[in-house]
Image: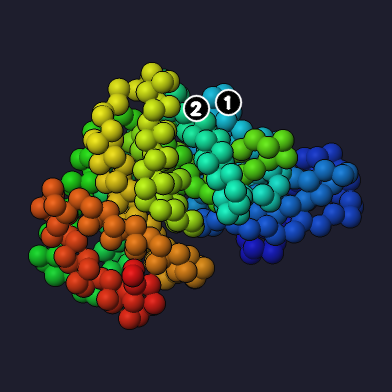
């Protein structure tokens, strides 16, 4: 069905679900979407607003969205209520959380308090019994597929660089080191995109979470590094480490995970971040090349800086990382800067 026809059908379905007459004069206006094929619309009806979601079932995980939403809600996390759904057509009618993302609020005084609120959400996620809930695993296959996007979509696709056999072997060795670190960590419910554009500031001052349908049972540092080394906002590294250790102390106080000491915790945090940064470079390049979503390219320099910094920090103790750092700085960064103005300083 063409997008225009789907939008009309979605509006008709939503009005019917709300008990409104078919001839109700209502207009659904598009709101900012995400990196998926989903489309979002705001529908004002009878002095209340709703969010309509067009989520084609061939590409979107609508059943998973509903299942994860229930899991999070039962854990005390504020998530939009699903008022109605039609899984066959891929239509959802949701509670409207408004437009106030966490991201712009971090530019104001009080970022510490905002992050403390986000830590409360992460603590609730970490307390969920993922085994009992039968949450699928963020396993080696998924982690490696994500890492593979870096070579395929960013280095070769976006930069046009042909990776040699030796370079491919180096990237494979780096990937296995990062996956080994990730799988050795305590496993919790992982949102997998827990950052300032997926956290909403609600009218009552609390924080809500959106875009959680890809949640898996995975490494406990993943969402933390997604939040603190956010693709859309950057902090001095000393501040990031301070916040990370503060969250670790809160996990220790919660007492439901067996945690390493601070030094090993920070190593896990950094290597998990490196896995995510490489994944994101590939994902942003894929969104541009395959899906025509170019806005993400403007955030590449920040992600490249994160990647370079983590490689440099651990090169002295990890020969594979040292070799990857040399290749990254020699071959990738200059080409990124030359072709796309995306080089890290």
Report the residue at 31% width, 29% height from top. 186
Residues at circles 1 and 2 in contact by the CB criterion of under 8 Å: yes
- Give the percent coordinates (x, y) of residue 97: 69, 43
Question: What scheme was used to colour the molecule?
Answer: rainbow
Q: Quadrant of the N terminus?
A: bottom right
Q: Residues within 10 Å of mark 1 (few under 14, many from 20)?
A: few
- Residue at (30, 22) in percent of width and height: 258
Picture disc at residue 237? none
Measured as percent of width and height from the top left, residue 331 is found at 21, 73
According to the image, label 1 marks what residue?
76
Name the residue located 14 percent from the left edge and 52 percent from the top edge.
316
* Left or right relative to 54: residue 195: left
Return the x and y of residue 240 as percentages of the image width and height: 40, 46
- Say above or below: 312 vs 345: above
Q: Quadrant of the C terminus?
A: bottom left
The answer to whether 24 appears left or right of 64 in the picture is: right
Badge 2 marks a residue whose secondary structure is helix
Badge 2 crowding class, 10 Å Cα cut-off, few under 14, some 14 to 19, many 20 or more, is some
Q: Who's the residue at 71% across and 47% down the image? A: 98
The answer to whether residue 86 shows anywhere in this view is no
Q: Residue 335 vs residue 289: left or right?
A: left
Task: Compare residues 160 and 3 and report the one nearer the observer.
Answer: 160
Q: CA distance from mark 1 to mark 2?
A: 7 Å
Q: Nearer the viewer, residue 231 or 295?
A: 231
Residue under label 2, please give it: 124
């Amino acid at each position: 069905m063409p997008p225009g026809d789907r939008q009309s059908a979605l509006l008709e379905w939503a009005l019917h679900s709300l008990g409104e007459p078919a001839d109700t004069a209502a207009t659904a206006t598009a709101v900012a979407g995400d990196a998926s094929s989903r489309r979002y619309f705001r529908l004002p009806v009878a002095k209340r607003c709703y969010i309509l979601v067009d989520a084609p079932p061939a590409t979107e995980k609508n059943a998973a969205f509903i299942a994860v939403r229930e899991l999070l809600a039962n854990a005390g996390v504020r998530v939009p209520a699903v008022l109605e759904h039609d899984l066959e057509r891929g239509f959802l009618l949701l509670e409207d959380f408004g437009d106030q993302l966490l991201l712009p609020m971090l530019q104001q005084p009080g970022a510490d308090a905002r992050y403390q609120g986000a830590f409360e959400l992460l603590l609730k996620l970490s307390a969920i019994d993922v085994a009992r809930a039968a949450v699928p695993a963020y396993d080696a296959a998924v982690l490696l597929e994500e890492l593979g996007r870096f070579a395929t979509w960013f280095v070769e696709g976006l930069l046009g660089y042909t990776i040699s056999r030796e370079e491919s072997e180096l990237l494979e060795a780096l990937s296995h080191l990062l996956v080994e670190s990730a799988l050795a960590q305590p496993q919790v419910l992982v949102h997998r995109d827990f950052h300032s554009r997926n956290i909403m500031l609600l009218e009552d001052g609390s924080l809500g979470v959106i875009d959680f349908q890809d949640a898996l049972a995975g490494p406990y540092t993943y969402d933390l590094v997604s939040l603190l080394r956010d693709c859309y906002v950057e902090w001095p590294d000393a501040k990031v480490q301070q916040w990370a250790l503060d969250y670790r102390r809160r996990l220790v106080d919660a007492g439901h995970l067996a945690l390493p000491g601070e030094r090993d915790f920070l190593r896990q945090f950094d290597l998990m971040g490196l896995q995510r940064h490489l994944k994101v470079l590939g994902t942003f390049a894929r969104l541009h090349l395959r899906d025509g979503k170019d806005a993400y390219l403007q955030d590449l320099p920040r992600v490249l800086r994160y990647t370079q910094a983590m490689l440099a920090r651990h090169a002295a103790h990890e020969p594979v990382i040292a070799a990857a750092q040399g290749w990254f700085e020699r071959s990738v960064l200059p080409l990124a800067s030359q072709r796309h103005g995306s080089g890290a300083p």
